[in-house]
Image: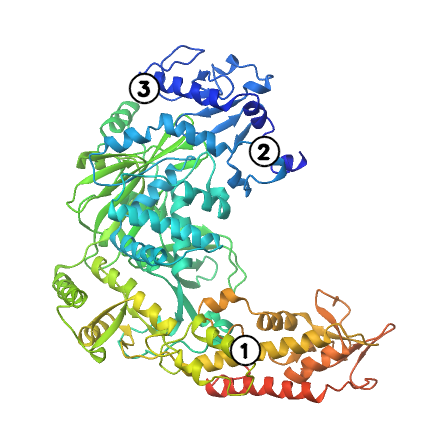
Amino acid sequence: MSSIKEKNICTHYHKVLLQRSLPKFFQEIQKLQVLYQKNNLKCEQCQYKIDVGNICLRCQAVICDLEKQCLHHHNQQKSDHCIFINLLSTQMTCIICKLEILDFEQYGLTGNEDVFSQWINPQRIRIEYLRYFQKQELSIQRFNSPNVGILNIANFSFMNSILQILLNFPTIQQILSKVHAEMEKGDFNVKSIKKIILRNICCISDALKSKSVKLLNPTELIKSIAQSESKLLGYGQKDAYEAFKYLINFLHEEFRFTNSISYWKNIIPFLNQEAIPHDWLLLSQASKFRDYSFIQNVFSGELQSTLQCLNCNRLTLVNENYSAISLEIPQIHEQNVISKFFNKLTKDRQDAVTLQNCLDLFYEPIQEMNFLCLCGSRNGRRTYKFSKFSNILAIHIQRFKNKHQKDQTYVSFPVEQTNFSNLLNMQGDLNYQLFGLIVHYSNVGGDHFESIVRQPNNTFISIRDDQINPVTLKYVKESEALMLFYQKVDSPTNYKTIHNVLTQYELIQTGEIVLKDDELSFLPNFWFEQFLTLSNPQMIITSHLLCFHNQLKPDYWDFRQSYENVSSQEQMNTSFVCDQSINLQQNNNSSSYFQLQLQSVQLPTAICQFLVEKYGGGPLIQKTIQTCTICIEQAQNMSKRRKLERGLIQKYENCQSDRQFIINLDWIIMWQRYLYNSKSQLQKNFIFGNPPPGEINNLPLLDSNHQLLQDKQVEKDYSLISQQLWTVLVSIYGGGPIIQVSSSSIEQGNSKLKTFDLDPEDNIKVKEIRTILNQCFKMYNICENIDCI
């Protein structure tokens, strides 16, 4: 039982259930459900009828409040009457341990551990209660809306509300639905929990789009999130804003790719259309590159932060990206109590707090103490202003002052199409229209969230988990919004362009127009969906798909399959790529080309050229493009180089010598990253892996007299290796200086070093290892002195 205490799990839960017969337990739930349907569920202590109650798992007694007048109905000293479940949130609580009973997955457990082998997973009990009291079958029949609801399981309402907003937005819905279709084509059997979460999100997105069901059960998504981010789950107070940040960051990480910063600064089309440089440049000079994803283009805007030193008046300007802005509610003093009460009832928009008031407070200067000016002062003032708008403006209104205090001040906000130039203090026609909002409700036993979403016919629906109902414009305007989502409205002049491009795409898809390969070009799927649905789709980004030779950049399977074929035949010649491996990379067989087809749309080259000229970016990728066999050959050579070097290391790493040699630990870490490259990185299209570490550099370990610094410690600043292993590494990488270690002293230099010579066969391997690297440097114009190499 020690593991139970370590995991802070209630020790009474399993005793309560094991003392009962589960069939009888579920039979009593059915009796309660009959009372619930007849509106005859009463608190056993105060005898008032209640819609939502707390039920004792031992005797099925119903009480309305665990902490107030009804608590004494159960003797707290009786451990078999201490576990309660709330009908609304299915939150389980032990009133003795003062602990929340969580599902096994939320502890990172599968339920198969020895100590839990006889336990009943709380999830099973929750599902049984949901089955009776949330009325899944009745909910399905009750729907008059074509939209899809999501069951509130495990107090998941806060996440349901965000999913309904994000996955009903056309751009996100279309892209995730296409990803889901590709996942379902093959066997999707991965162990990565993040890929499982992505698949579950894509499944929900596809269901919301196809409307193939009327009610979704998010249990699989809850289980996968529990293993990755257990802090999001539980049955205490939750915040939809936290769920929003989690989903946005998660989708960005899953769909991001990298491009050079100079590419993003390009305003005039065609000035900068180079492909990404070699993988090693990207990995070793990360500050020169920027990550991008379609989810970022949907939500990301830019703020300009101005920091003024109050001592020397020095100004520092910094641009910061945002996916949502969080606004405080200003305190507006009413004239008297009567007018305050009246305004709360009527929600008078003239006297209430407005969204403009919240933004004005956001623009006000704030004191900044966590900085150090060049003059030595730490006293500064920071102001923010918008410098770049986003396609969807997400606004969070800070209503929770602390865990138990909510600000219920009514904040009025625009609903119909409005020019936000005054609100954002930016010039131009920044027309936004409310797409959706989220409302928080405090209920007995937990929080509840409502999503209000605009429909294509400009009506609104309210989604409270499994309950979906149309609502009036007045209802929307009077809602106590927690989050607001505004969509940038496109100018009418772009509608004709979109219509013409979409017509061409559909004619090609249906086969009514047949063009030759050299008359077609690829456009990224994610950009095409943004072009159809967003006001500002930004640049057409394709350079990350091209290699240094302006051919299609190969992926992991393009070089790995042929490499394994060659290795199995033990062909270790210098050229390394036989005719068979080159033939595997033809246009119709290449894995990278196949992925390009899946992730792109095909349009006439003339239209693609027009779109690149209009929106910038590029370069164009024509259908006749070939996968680069030169990059495949070089990637295979680097795989061979690692294999040869690992063979030498395995041969000499266990050798014993009279003396040991000191080697810089920082160098060792870079060397290990290169030599034992992870397959996950290769599959992220870094097919060359991590760069080699460059020459051995022991100088940071020595003082001005070339003696080992006294504060340097073994396994913290340096490692000790045998003479044989040192000889192998120096033969391959060069560098130094040599620092020998004997039992009595540390010696620097070669004065007392007994040489160790490699076998002639090993010398040939070292020469081949060095030759492969030099060829790669030369072919890709890589300077050997760049970072990490």
The correct choice, above or below, for 392 with respect to 262 in the image is above
In the picture, measured across the screen, residue 661 lies left or right of residue 456, that is: right
The correct choice, above or below, for 711 with respect to 205 in the image is below
Task: Give the SS element for disc 3.
Answer: helix
Task: Give the SS element for disc 1.
Answer: helix
Q: What residue is at 37 percent from the left and 49 percent from the top?
A: 201
Task: State whether residue 760 appears in this view.
Answer: yes
Task: Judge by depth and name the residue closer to the eye, 503 or 234.
Answer: 503
Q: Which of marks 2 and 3 is nearer the N terminus?
A: 2
Q: Which of marks 3 and 1 is nearer the N terminus?
A: 3
Instruction: Estimate the spatial distance between the alpha carbons at disc 3 and disc 1, rounded to whole Å.
Output: 70 Å
In the picture, measured across the screen, residue 457 lies left or right of residue 375, that is: left
Q: Residues within 10 Å of mark 2 (few under 14, many from 20)?
A: some
Considering every residue shown, the one lying at the far right of the view is 744
Q: Which colour scheme is used?
A: rainbow
Whole-percent x, y for residue 49 in the image:
36, 14
Which image quadrant: the C terminus?
Answer: bottom right
Question: Given the image, on which type of amino acid does mark 3 rest?
Answer: Gln
Whole-percent x, y for residue 746 in the image:
82, 75
Whole-percent x, y for residue 159 in the image:
38, 42
- Residue that label 3 marks: 37
